[in-house]
Amino acid sequence: MQIHPIRTEADHDSAVARIAELIGARPDTAEGEELDILATLVDAYEAKHHAIDVPDPIAAIQFRMEQQGLTRKNLEPLIGSRARVSEVMTGRRSLTLAMIRRVRKELGISADVLIGHPQKRHRKRVHSSKLEPASVNPKRQAAAG
């Protein structure tokens, strides 16, 4: 048993191949110990180098809607009025705790996913200090004077 840290994809591939050879090993044997250690090393390497991001809450809802053949109308009992569903699905409004509970229960989407931060889907508002001064914009000059 020659075990070393997994630092490269080649190391990872070798460890995975060895795990495949040892997969049926009994726990209290040298092979079982090697399997346990290699699995731990591979898991740590994959968590660091192949991490999967939690999906956007809205993307998760849309995916589940596609899976189940649902429409936005089907979300109204879970989220609220047609306008509220639209606001949530376009990212203009966040899911509330009550909405998260209902969506989790009815659609089976993890609360961890639903609590996540949605990607902004609308344009950023420009702060008034970023606009040009009134002297540059004749309409603003008229309004100011």
Image (cartoon, helix red, strand yellow):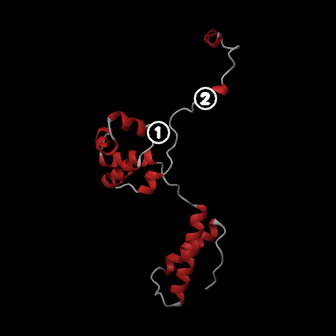
Horizontal and vertical percent for residue 36?
A: 53, 81
Give the quadrant of the N terminus: bottom right
Image quarter for residue 95? top left
Horizontal and vertical percent for residue 125?
A: 57, 30
* Residue lying at the far front of the rendered structure: 145
Q: Is residue 93 left or right of residue 74?
A: right
User: How far apart are labels 2 and 1 at the CA level?
Assistant: 18 Å
Q: Which residue is mark 1?
A: 91
Q: Nearer the viewer, residue 77 or 67?
A: 77
Q: Which residue is mark 2?
A: 126
Q: Nearer the viewer, residue 128 or 15?
A: 128
Residue 103, compared with residue 123, is above or below; it is: below
Residue 16, compared with residue 98, is above or below; it is: below
Q: Residues within 10 Å of mark 2 (few under 14, many from 20)?
A: few
Image quarter for residue 86? top left
Q: Residues within 10 Å of mark 1 (few under 14, many from 20)?
A: some
Q: Nearer the viewer, residue 98 or 27?
A: 98
Q: Is residue 45 left or right of residue 88?
A: right
Horizontal and vertical percent for residue 105?
A: 32, 55
Q: Please state which amino acid type lies under the numbered disc 1.
A: Gly
**Image point 41% across, 56% down: which residue?**
111
Q: Secondary structure at mark 2?
A: loop
